[in-house]
Amino acid sequence: MTITNRVALPVQRTPEATDLRPGAEAGRRVRRAGPLTVVGLIAAAILSVFPLYWMVVIASRTNDSAYAWPPALMPGGNLGENVQRVLDNSDAAILKGIVNSFIVAGTITLSTVIFSAMAGFAFAKLRFRGRNALLLMILLTMMIPVQLNIVPLYDLMITFGWLNDIKAVIVPFLISGFGIFLMRQYTIQSVPDELIEAARVDGCSIWRVFYHVVAPALRPAAAVLGLLTFMQYWNEFFWPFIVLADPGNPTVQISLRTLNSAYHQDLSQIFAGTFVATVPLVIVFVVFFRQIISGIMEGAVKA
Amino acid sequence: MSSLETNAAPPAPMPRPGRRKRPDGGRRHRIGVRMARLDYRVSPYLYIAPFFILFAIFGLYPTAYTIWLSFTDMSPMNPTTSFVGLDNYSRLLGDPNFWNAVGNTLGIFVLATVPQLLMALILANWLNRKLRGVHFFRAMTAIPIVTSTAVVGLVFGLAFFARDYGLANGLLETFGVERIDWRAQKWSSWLAISSMIDWRWTGYNALIYLAGMQAISNDLYEAAEIDGASRARQFWQITVPLLRPTIIFTVIISTIFGLQLFAEPVMFTSGTGALGGGSLGQFQTVTMFVVEAMRSHQRWGYAATGGLALLLMIVVVAAINFLLIRRLGSER
């Protein structure tokens, strides 16, 4: 529906010729980096990691040392204990939040990838009346922020009986315009018309063309779209904040919000919570960083 | 998924024998052809239907509803809803809290976006050099996007920009500067919130710029080198102008998302009353204002009007930025 994360938008201007590989600079002589550049890059890398590192430091120490000056610079030995405390916190229900976030992000990812591939294929390779107008319409709908419609959407959730139910944060987002554009672009690039013609001449139905010819070719793009979608909905804050307001059935981000709204501030417990909420995505990032980076970069190159 | 099922086994132009019980082969063939034609005519719509069905329910209908709501006094507290004409609009235009939120949103947006995009340009220029381990640096640059906006808000709000402890004040004191109550004033809270946005998005934008830079032909740089242009001059006179489409793109995206700012300022307040954005609304954004109108004040009609105002604001600011950047580029 609407795009709620910046990660999602770039590809609406997806270029005609993109390269999913990171750093595709074939045939280019790139200038060497000077020492200043190296220093700058190291500084940037440290700055990028530092807040995450600091989170681990506080999450692994006692509350006293979180308030101390000069602060402790190295992680301590209390991580397990702090994590245990945050898992035991029944107000925040962070374990429930993590399970919910997996269900929410996982379901949306799966359905976005499948439906976007189907629609992207239709827009790329099938002829039908109103194709361009409908495509333009999808582009325009991507501009509508959820914020605009919170009241009607909230009302709709009440009507459906989905308030404080994770269906409310899943169903409206099962497909994205961004995904359709990405898949359309990738289908145009990677599936030659001749291949589809050949399958048609052989008497394949459209579904078989899609399933046996197009879908396998779309795998790399599906991986990128899936990763970005999963990260986006794992991190989503605004809409869950609105519809999962009552405690007891949060996503993990809403658990963090509950921790933060407690009257008594327990820093090491809060940071143990942020640690637990971030670790799954750090793992995803470490395993798939090439795809993630190429997904971001791919959206940028203009035709 | 119904589209999958209806398409799962449509008869091909040449159906396999035995699939159908009709004895007349020619007729069977004709039916097959007709079905295939139907398949090709109807399937495209089935393939794109999921998007449009969801959009109708969760996009189109709510938008129409929002517009209608903005002319009513609807509230869960009111037993009936009545049409109030332009009352909500005139009230909004005279509401100092709304204008305060507009000012905060624009202030934080400028404070966050300008340095962020400049830093991203420089960072991308560095990442575009030949260097050992450049993929490592790219990965490091991208890593902030794994953190949710809620986590960023907590780490920056509680560990860096706390009042009585925290890194920022600790460092200030070490250098003999007085501690700052970051949440107390507009400028300090804006600065703290902007730093959260900058940290999370600079690397992301740098990667987008990097992709744009890789599309620039190297011949231009070689020619400039021969003409004796310095590195800095090459950057400002070749890289930046040629990157203009990409820059426009990042500015528009930053505008759309920057003006919707919500999670970071909400998480900046610990305890209750987070939607107010500080004791006097020092960092209440428009989105927070809208949610507060809906949730805390139960004024749904008014909140809908606020939502429309936010959309209008995004469109206007995006258009202004687009024109600005386009002009800046062409003057070079």
Image (cartoon, coloured by chain):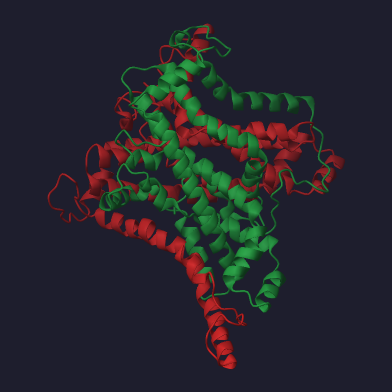
Q: Is residue A12 left or right of residue B135?
A: left
Furthest toward the right, the residue is B226
Q: Colour of chain A?
A: green
Q: Is residue B179 above or below residue B90?
A: above
Q: Is residue B252 left or right of residue A173?
A: right
Name the spot of residue A263 as percent of width and height, x first. 31, 20
Corner quadrant of residue B222 = top right
Name the spot of residue A56 as percent of width and height, x first. 54, 20
Residue visible at 72% across and 23% down?
Answer: A39
Q: Is residue B115 visible?
A: no
Corner quadrant of residue A262 = top left
- The residue closer to the viewer here, B278 or A222, is A222
Residue visible at 58% across and 52% down?
Answer: A11
Name the spot of residue B280 as percent of width and height, x first. 30, 27
Q: Is residue B223 above or below residue B138?
A: below
Q: Is residue A38 visible?
A: yes
Q: Which chain's colour is red?
A: B
Residue visible at 64% across and 64% down?
Answer: A212
